[in-house]
Image (tube, helix red, strand yellow):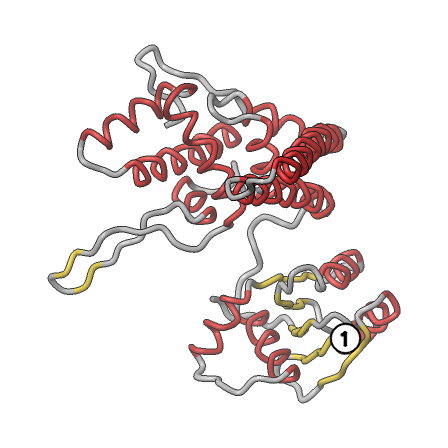
Amino acid sequence: MSETTTLAAGIDTAKAKLDIAIHGCATHFTVANDRAGWRQLAREFGKAGVCRVGIEATGGYERGVVASLRARGFTVLVFQPLQVKAYARLHLRRAKNDRLDAMLIAACAAALDAPEVAPDPRLPDLADALTFIEQTEEDIARIKTRLEHIRDARLRRCALADIKRLKARRTAELKRLAAALRRHDDLARRLDLLQSIPGIGLRTALCLVVRMPELGRIGREQAAALVGLAPFDDDTGQHRGERHIAGGRSRVRGSLYAAALPAAFRWNPALIALYQRLTAKGKTHKAALIACARKLVIYANTVLARGTPWIATPAGAALTA
């Protein structure tokens, strides 16, 4: 956290309305969560001299006002709910209503630093398309699980037809997303660099480009932590606890974990060696795969930072490791 003299405001978001508070002031007002409300909000912020705005991620209801304010030159910080809750606990605040939440978010916006990597306005629409693909994959997995308990031949045919239809949709949407991303030369370059890494295919590369814009501009430890693949200590006094991963971007982590399995068994010599070395030391299959997934995001970060494709040494170890 850092001290700042920039006047900050906080927005508590609901489907139909926005509650607004300005840090250090008694000002509190409400506007509709629509285009007219966003324009009114920008005017009020302009009059008050607000430059920085904090808002909590609420599953998509915040996206319209965020885009509107950023287009008008405001710095908008989108907080995860965990950040706001942690700030409330730090200041021993237990009471909760829309007005108090807006005040709390305003305080967060005033105290916390803006992200080092500016938001890319092209990514939200691409992320929507990727989310649809991920949800289609989840639908396929659910039907496959359901199929295990279906005995009636007609119902099994229905379920299998649904799986076939969803797989075709997934393939078509992946092609459409890749084509949309390749309309931007810089994003296409990032996609090609990521796909040069053995074990990272189109599906995983798309996820990393769209959901991890920081890659290539942060350190390897920070990259692993952002995805939730960094092992955290659990030590106190004489106790030495088992290391665990926690938090992070779950959809990116899931994509990397899914890619790590075939990469560690077939596609990536460095990860094959790593997996075998860890399991030989007694690590479980899951722990070894998590380590391989962590290596994948580190490789991705290094390849993008260097701006050159993956190169492996003759011994099979990655030059980017």
Query: What is the x, y in percent for residue 93?
Result: 48, 84
> Above or below — where is 37 with respect to 79?
below
Q: Quadrant of residue 22?
A: bottom right
Q: Which residue sits furthest right?
A: 36
Q: Secondary structure at mark 1?
A: strand
Which residue sits at x=26%, y=38%? 284
The residue pinned by badge 1 equals 17
Q: Is residue 216 left or right of residue 219?
A: right
Q: Nearer the viewer, residue 261 or 45?
A: 261
Q: Quadrant of residue 65?
A: bottom right
Which residue sits at x=71%, y=85%? 28
Residue 63 visible, this orientation:
yes
Amino acid at dot 1:
Lys
Query: What is the x, y in percent for residue 127?
Result: 67, 45
Query: What is the x, y in percent for residue 249?
Result: 51, 50
For the C terminus, give its image quadrant.
top left
Q: Is residue 139 left or right of residue 44?
A: left
> Above or below — where is 317 with respect to 293?
above
